[in-house]
């Protein structure tokens, strides 16, 4: 794990909770948002926000940012939060990655610089929904939205070209944390989201 102190640089943390899943047959955020907020709080962000529409149960003390770009997927939420964040770095965590632990987020934060974020790489594939983006990425995000290219893999590639992020090779022991929940059966035991799958 990197040795630098992630708290040397204040950062904004955002829970990406704007999506709905037809495969789930319900809003994904219902059983998971509280757990994900607790994970984000554990890494002590200077600012904590939620991206997406306000839902019943959200704390009134946590700002909720509706997307400024509608119907464009997670890139719209990330761009909105980059635009409104009060800090130079934005830590994002998607609501349907409920195995992510604070230690993993701290490893990401420790690999950042003042104006350079970090994106996990697993099996030669970027994991852009649990990553750290610099606020300076906003201009590129908006430019990509204007081109109607909403693919996050393309966004990360562009940030790498501009040296605005680096890659973080996910260790074998961390890979289970990137399991995505999108099926109804994934919700059967949400309280045990932190339990490692048997192998």
Image (cartoon, rainbow, N blue to C red):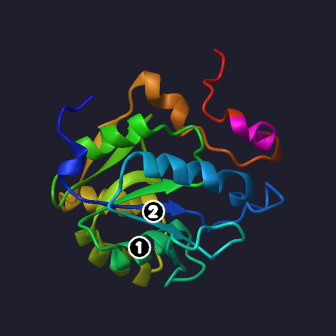
Q: Which residues are magenta?
A: 186-191
As drawn, 69 above or below 154: below
Disc 1 crowd rating (10 Å Cα; few below 14, some 14-19, many 20+) is many
Residue located beneath label 2 in the image: 14
As drawn, 116 above or below 54: above
Magenta span main SS = helix
Q: Position of residue 11 (x, y in %)?
A: 29, 60
Give the residue at x 38% y 26%. Answer: 171
Q: Position of residue 75 (x, y in %)?
A: 47, 69
Give the residue at x 43% y 22%. Answer: 172
Q: Is residue 124 visible?
A: no
Most foreground residue, 58 or 182: 58
Residue 42 circle label: none
As drawn, 102 above or below 155: above
Quadrant that contains the N terminus? top left
Give the residue at x 18% y 57%. Answer: 163
Q: Residue furthest top?
A: 199
Residue located beneath label 1 in the image: 81
Disc 1 + disc 2, Cβ < 8 Å: yes
**Residue 30, picture quadrant:** bottom right
* 98 displayed left or right of 172: right
Q: Secondary structure at mark 2?
A: strand
Disc 2 crowd rating (10 Å Cα; few below 14, some 14-19, many 20+) is many
- Label 1 and label 2: CA atoms lie apart by 8 Å
Q: Is residue 136 covered in magenta?
A: no
* 30 displayed left or right of 133: right
Quadrant that contains the C terminus? top right
């Amino acid at each position: 794990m990197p040795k630098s102190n992630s708290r040397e640089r204040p950062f904004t943390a955002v829970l990406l909770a704007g999506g709905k899943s037809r495969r789930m047959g319900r809003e994904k955020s219902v059983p998971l948002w509280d757990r994900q907020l607790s994970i984000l709080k554990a890494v002590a962000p200077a600012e904590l926000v939620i991206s997406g529409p306000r839902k019943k149960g959200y704390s009134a003390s946590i700002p909720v940012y509706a997307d400024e770009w509608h119907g464009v997927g997670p890139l719209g939420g990330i761009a909105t939060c980059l635009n409104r964040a009060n800090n130079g770095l934005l830590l994002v965590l998607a609501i349907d990655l409920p195995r992510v632990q604070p230690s993993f987020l701290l490893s990401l934060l420790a690999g950042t610089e003042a104006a350079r974020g970090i994106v996990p790489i697993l099996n030669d594939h970027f994991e852009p929904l649990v990553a750290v983006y610099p606020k300076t990425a906003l201009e590129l995000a908006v430019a990509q939205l204007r081109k109607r290219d909403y693919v996050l893999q393309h966004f990360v590639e562009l940030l790498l070209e501009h040296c605005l992020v680096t890659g973080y090779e996910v260790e074998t022991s961390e890979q289970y944390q990137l399991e995505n929940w999108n099926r109804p059966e994934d919700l059967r035991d949400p309280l045990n989201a932190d339990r490692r799958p048997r192998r």
